Image (cartoon, rainbow, N blue to C red):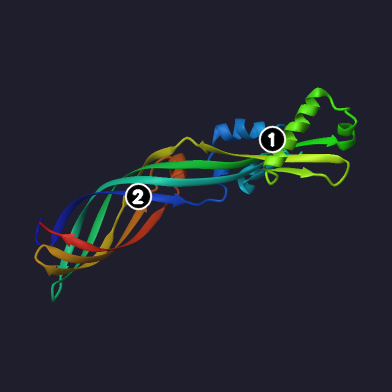
Amino acid sequence: MTEKIDLDLHAAYDHMALHEDTVILEWDWPYWDERYIDWLLTGATGEEVDSISTELEYWRPDSSYHGIFHPSQWLNELRFGAGASFLFPLKWNWTLYGNVGGGISIFRRRLKVVEDWTKIFTWEWDSLEVHNGELTEEEMNNYQLFNELHNSDPQVYQLDTLNSVYRLRYDYQTTITHFAPDKKGFRVYLTPSVGVRYFLKKGLSLDLSYQGIWYMNIGDGETRESFPVRSKSMLWLGLEFSY
């Protein structure tokens, strides 16, 4: 607008990883809370259901299942705004400037839960019954199958032969990934900044600045809760090209 006042339009994209100990519990995920965990913990108390979201581990009472949960969440943000810069030329090619701006942030928050599950299969048989031919045809087929598996891979198919009752164990492992419904919306923000610029030559300058972003307390409570960032502080160092 003048030699000392500039107007600008800006767009920015941020990708942020978020860390929260109780994210599954606080996400308010109906499928997880009302169907999935209820299926795992049939007849459990509310405290036991919540414990999976806080402890991130589950042992079935009979030890046949074991699950470890790895939640991860991230926040994508697209900002559009405008501002005004005020320039204060100094000596020796230095210029001090300040900027005041604001705009709208469009965000999408996502949650992924990776579950590492182990199901433990065991089968026992009495060596005397095998020797005396007292097993049924199905039990004998199982006995021969498990012995072949143990002989092919004894580390995976573990055989306990400490007494006359033999016990074979196999741990089946699998990974399940769940995605929660996205939380999305928009926030209004203000973004003041201050910096110093050194002109290396015509059209090229070195820029060092501080930028703050403050999100306004505007909108319903659910939207504000979905966007957990209240402010950001950033330091910028870069080259600026002028045309």
Residue 216's mark? none
Q: In which quarter of the image is the C terminus?
A: bottom left
Residue 4 screen position, x and y as percent: 12, 62
Q: Which amino acid does label 2 sit on?
A: Asp
Q: Please tell me which residue lies in front, 45 or 16.
A: 16
Q: Which of marks 2 and 1 is nearer the N terminus?
A: 2
Q: Is 236 or 168 nearer to us in this picture?
A: 168
Residue 231 horizontal/vertical position (percent): 39, 55
Q: Mark 2 points at which residue?
A: 14
Asked if the residues shown at circle 2 and circle 1 are in contact, with their CB atoms under 8 angstroms apart, the answer is no
Which residue: 82% across, 44% down? 161
State whether residue 47 is above or below residue 232. Answer: above
Q: What element carries label 2?
A: strand
CA gap, disc 2 to disc 1?
Answer: 39 Å
Residue at (88% x, 41% y) in the render: 164
Side of 53 where 109 appears, left or right: left
Query: Relative to residue 204, is residue 80 drawn left or right?
Result: right
Check disc 1 and report the residue beneath it.
41
Crowding near pointer 1: few (<14 within 10 Å), some, many (20+)? Answer: some
